[in-house]
Amino acid sequence: MSTAALPASSSEEPETYVHGAAPVRLWSRAFIDLLIAEALFGFSYAQFVLLPKLLTVGYGATAGQIGTVMGAFGVASLLTIPLMAPIVKRFDYRRAMIAGYVLLGASALAFLSISSAGALAAVLRGAQGIAWSLTFAVGMALVADVAPPARLGHAIGLYGAAGLSMSALGPAIAEPIAARYGARPVFLLSAVVALIGAWFCRRLSPTVSSAPATAAKPLPGAARRRAAVIGVLAVGSMSAAVVSTFVAPFALTYRIHVVRGFFIVYTLTALVMRVAGTRVTDKLGQRRAAIAGAAGYGFVMIAMGGAGPSHLAVLGGLFGLFHGIVFPALMALVLHQSAPDERPRLLAVTNGAINLGITGVGVIGAVAERVGYPAVFIVAGVVTTAAAALLYTRDPGRVPNPPR
């Protein structure tokens, strides 16, 4: 696909672009369509937030088996990263998004046939990883294309919030259904919503605007700083995967059988930060926000490992607070000063870093069988907090307002 194509939505051009320059208004039809599409994907995907618990309760899975199945998500995503940038460049964004939703729906439907937490479950979870990688690359590129540069962090926060909000609704719906009817109706619900999302994606723009080609000249040391950001994304993704994968099995060791409160409070808190907090970090600087978010996330993991999961709602709120800060800030730092034709490559590398972190869950699951969940949470928290130091620079990392 040529980056010299028409703007994202010709019917919205008078509202979104000025003289072919960068977009000046956030709330365009193109951006709203992206939010709706992401919400549908997020709801379908969120049905699998409780997959570790479903595998434990319904299929007798061990920590090692859970780690292998969940880690397959990252492995498959990582192996297909080299294909993402060529796919995004060769095919239009609309078809790439539709393909991601269809793949998610098909894999969810195929989960109806699993009988254990074995190879088939791992393969299907891997397929979901590929679907996520594809929609992540396309969705983020479209957000960067339709959002004003000075509002990029806020736009990324809102886009993420659309999907993240479903992480509260998904477990709230899935856990009671699974408790009464088993896991299969949850898998079916995920498949139906994903296919609805594929249908809705026909509304999305097939092209990327040529407008932001006036990206600012990178500052000295920008490549080094961007590499540090991507490294922190990898570590943060590993930590987030540890939390989402092992919080339910960890709670079960304390005879805590209901964990949806953790995910609901986690999500609501992260949503508040992404909707309201990212507007503030756009003004204060994404680098400072990213350092605080990464360090805070690590400290909460240490606290959870040391004190245990007895206060899941409180822990969920703290995790959500720092998660809502760190991810939009890191993504804004990656995409800042990027030209449209380099975004597919940047997002492929970023996606690879995220999935490299997720892939570590397989190894961590095996370690947890030997040393226990508390040690895993503490060590992962220490590593996450230490990684925040990689972001330190004399440059505060603020994304400046564009010249007017």
Image: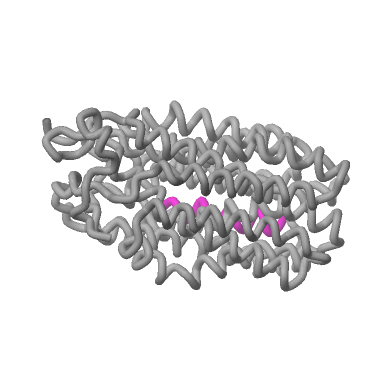
- As drawn, 221 above or below 145: below
Q: Residue at x 45, y 53 (%)?
A: 97
- Report the front residue among 329 and 75: 75
Q: Position of residue 94 (x, y in %)?
A: 40, 51
Q: Residue at x 36, y 40 (%)?
A: 288
Q: Is residue 402 magenta?
A: no
- Report the front residue among 172 and 203: 203
Q: Is residue 403 visible?
A: yes
Q: Position of residue 282 (x, y in %)?
A: 32, 33
Q: Is residue 376 magenta?
A: yes
Displayed quadrant of residue 59: bottom right
Q: Position of residue 76 (x, y in %)?
A: 55, 69
**Extent of the magenta region:** 374-389
Left or right, 163 with respect to 183, comes to left
Left or right, 88 with respect to 354, comes to left
Q: Which color scheme is applied?
A: one colour
Q: Is residue 312 visible?
A: no
Q: Position of residue 163 (x, y in %)?
A: 53, 40
**Which quadrant would the C terminus be assigned to in this image?**
top left
Q: Residue at x 72, y 35 (%)?
A: 172
Q: Residue at x 20, y 34 (%)?
A: 17
Magenta-colored segment: predominant secondary structure:
helix
